[in-house]
Amino acid sequence: MEISRLGIFEIKNLLLKREVSCTELVRAYIERAKRLNPVLNCFITISEESALIEAKKTDDLITKRRDNIRPLEGLPVAIKDIFVTQNIRTTCGSKILENFIPPFDATIVRRLKDAGAIIFGKLNMDEFAMGSSNENSYFGPVRNPFDLSRSPGGSSGGSAAAVAAGLTPASIGTDTGGSIRQPAAFCGIIGMKPSYGRVSRYGMIAFASSLDQAGPMCRSVRDCAILLESIAGNDPKDSTTMSTPVPRYTDWTVGDPSEIRVGILRPEVYEGINPEVFLAYRGVIEFFERSGVPVTYIELPHIKYAVAVYYIIATSEASSNLARYDGVKYGLRAKEYKNLKDMYLKTRLEGFGSEVKRRIILGTFALSSGYYDAFFKKASQVRRLIANDFYRSFSKVNTIIMPVTPDVAFKLGEKISDPLSMYLSDIFTIPVNLAGLPSISMPAGKNKDGLPIGIQFIGKPFDEHVLINVAAFYEKESNCMDILNEVNL
Amino acid sequence: MNYEAIIGLEVHAQLKTRSKIFCGCPNRFGSNPNTNVCPVCLGMPGTLPVLNRFAVELAVRTALALNCFVHKESRFARKNYFYPDLPKGYQITQYDKPLATGGYLEIETGNGPKKIRIKRIHLEEDAGKDLHDISPEKSYIDYNRSGVPLVEIVTEPDISSPEEASKFLKTLRNVLMYLEVCDGNMEEGSLRCDANISVRKKGSNEWGTKTEIKNLNSFKFLERALTCEIERHIGILERNEKIEQQTMLYDPKENTTRPMRSKEESHDYRYFEEPDLLPLILTDEDILSFREDICELPHQKKKRYIEQFGISSYEADILVQDKQIADFFEDCILLLNEPKQIASWIINDYMRELNQRKISIKESPVTPHKLVAIIKQLRDNKITLNMAREIFVILFEEGGDVQEIINRKGFEIIDDTEEIIKSVREIISSHPEELAKYKKGNQNLIGFFMGELMRRMKGKIDPKKAREIVKSELDKA
């Protein structure tokens, strides 16, 4: 069975028409994942046994009574290994959790299961979601399906590459500073970071609590809508989720251009970015103009501080969030130690990779007595200014279009020894997290080497449906998703 | 002594909620280790806190009763430090925006009432408990206490002696128990106290260097530790040496204080706003409705008892020291309007029995109905005081019904004056020697005749009446 180009809707049809059984389907995905994992390294864990048990249940259900079929019935999905899964190992890409088997499911896992999905694997990622290349994973880097010598992006690198290579029809990633959108852009797929508070963070291992959001990564806007519809909404276990009703996102996939009002930054902002990326971005703007969509300039004067602000806030929160990995209760504990302090030091020294340690040290410093005001407090104030810039712009437009990254997928090893240049590659994704906005990343063509270039549509808080409308229109008129036909693995 | 002490207290009170502050686990003392735990209070990866609104209600009630200003918006913060009993590596507490500020609690001192100002009250979570005594080479941790809701109550440095500190803590404990926000059990750690202390020359305007004494978990230890620490400070000052700012622990065995950690080792807690919780917002309606739940407080009750029931300030003070006893007292008065008699019975007989048996009034078998039944019989001269006391003890030991005991024991008062006179005359005539001694002026012999009479009448007469009759008959004889 050829499954490598299937999305959620195609699979749904196959299952409902009983052209394929769920068991066959799940088996096919697991076989493909196993066959290609030595090449791509997308999966940290494949949970074959439990997935096949669930598949059997779906097959029974579909043959017995066809009236009560749930929205994702029998859909095999893999998720980033940052979401805790009951009885399935959850590593967060780290040695410190290498053998951690959680006793509970994350809310999004619960919701996916309740919608009928079958979770058959856990996807590779930068350790604790810290990184933009997937090279910070304890389980080794993931390779980009478009060019195996290149990074798939990060931190949701496994999630993006697995979707692009057809190892899973869709996946769920997380985005703290671009970790869904940047790998989606590098791998030619769609990735949405929802508004802060739209999707529950319960059971999603925290990196930076005020920035983290989970979102779908997939092959079509319709898939994005149906996945988001399944996972979004208030969760009593996460106080930061909002009770704002969840629209039927699938109703917004018509792609009506009359509702769209686009805002863009002046071209000077993009000086220094890869010219091919800029051209692709210009192409998208021109596409909307040709379609009769009003395009106006907006000002975001403070986004130039976004990277600095982000690396203070995110590292500060991370330094606190990662304190629980101390060898006392679960996860790795150093084998030999002299006393309690020695146990802490050795456990964390052995358990964390160098990027995680770097960020813990940065964050600990930024929160230290005497530095708090100059760093964390100031960063929080500038964060507010950045958000206000966006809110002001949204009085005139409902979609801001920006490139996702200043460049296309880089070579593995190219930036790993230069953290600053790695950090700067998140310059267009980070401001969105700081302001808590939704944003969807789409393919916008390719460079001369055939590498995908990404574009993002940014909306105001809880306007995911508006973005789905924009994305659906763009997808329909531009055939941008055809890029995935170039992956042949 | 030409020095004065300046003392401030930090009191932690566990709130009497059914579940923990950030998860649904039971808030219960004494369960098997690590049975009241879940992924949230164990700090498992991915878990998030959800605030228990009832804990907020109890904290607000406390703040209002202590005359504090309750802020409509307060915030939670993380206090970061590593310790095995702290599962997340940080404690969720309140820092720069606490729940309430600026109140006071009035205490009675030798020099009359004194207001101790309350600086702030905030909500936070308790940590787990290290168990070092199970194994010689290993430490164990019980996380049942992890996430139990606490209020921290911080005073201004208004306390000037160890006795005042202890008085404050007693008064505060009683208020918390009245409010039903805390069970006040210091042995189980429901109420814990740290003290900040500095000493300076009397009349000086400058503050001395302060030290903090941790974990003073009884009134006695609080007083003794402060006394030790004051002496230690004075000793240092007298030697013209410098007091080091440090955290001390009190050793009750040696009756001394010693440093727990010096300033160099002091923590930098790296406080920052807790991103997993929204600001805590209270509306005027919330605060108003919490205020309605505040019961009459001990000092208000005391005032009312004196005015309404005419009992002494001393008696009123004893009755209001324990809300259960005050409630019992009021229940009795509803049944029988004899407040002075009832107060006297409770304070003397009843509390003695409770203390001897080490039980609370709620556990006692003697209900207000039973106590009142005894007092009624006594008032109506149906039984003597001795009989009443005997009945009371029987009720405690065996239970039963007052009238039934009276019948069974044949308790009754012989009120027939003629019969008593007859008996007295017979006793006198059969004891001529004793009569002669009495006539010679030995007044003690009244006791002898009384005893004879009581034996003969089986104690069933009113002793006061009996004594009058014996005396007049002896004088006539």
Image (cartoon, rainbow, N blue to C red):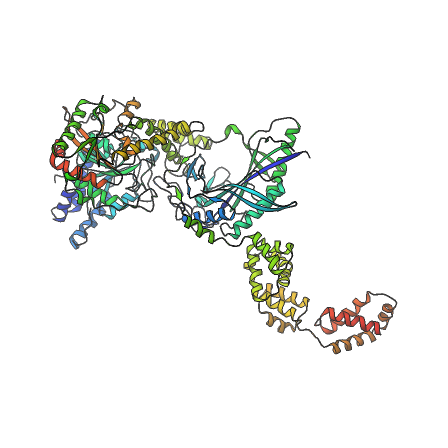
Q: Is residue A3 left or right of residue A232?
A: left
Q: Is residue B32 left or right of residue B316?
A: left
Q: Position of residue B378 (x, y in %)?
A: 65, 68
**Image quadrant where residue B105 sits:** top right
**Image quadrant where residue A296 sits:** top left
Q: Position of residue A16 (x, y in %)?
A: 14, 49
Depth check, front residue: A56 or A90: A90
Q: Position of residue A448 (x, y in %)?
A: 14, 23
Depth check, front residue: A27 or B292: B292
Residue B94 shows in this picture? yes
The total of numbered circles placed on residues is 0
**Image quadrant where residue A170 sits:** top left
Q: The C terminus of chain B appears in which quarter of the rendering?
A: bottom right
Work out whether B458 lies above or below A65.
below
Depth check, front residue: A398 or B432: A398
Residue A77 shows in this picture? no
Q: Position of residue B43 (x, y in %)?
A: 39, 40
Q: The N terminus of chain B appears in which quarter of the rendering?
A: top right
Depth check, front residue: A313 or B25: A313
Work out whether A378 lies above or below B192.
above
Residue lying farthest to the front in this orientation: A396
Q: Is residue B293 left or right of residue A325?
A: right
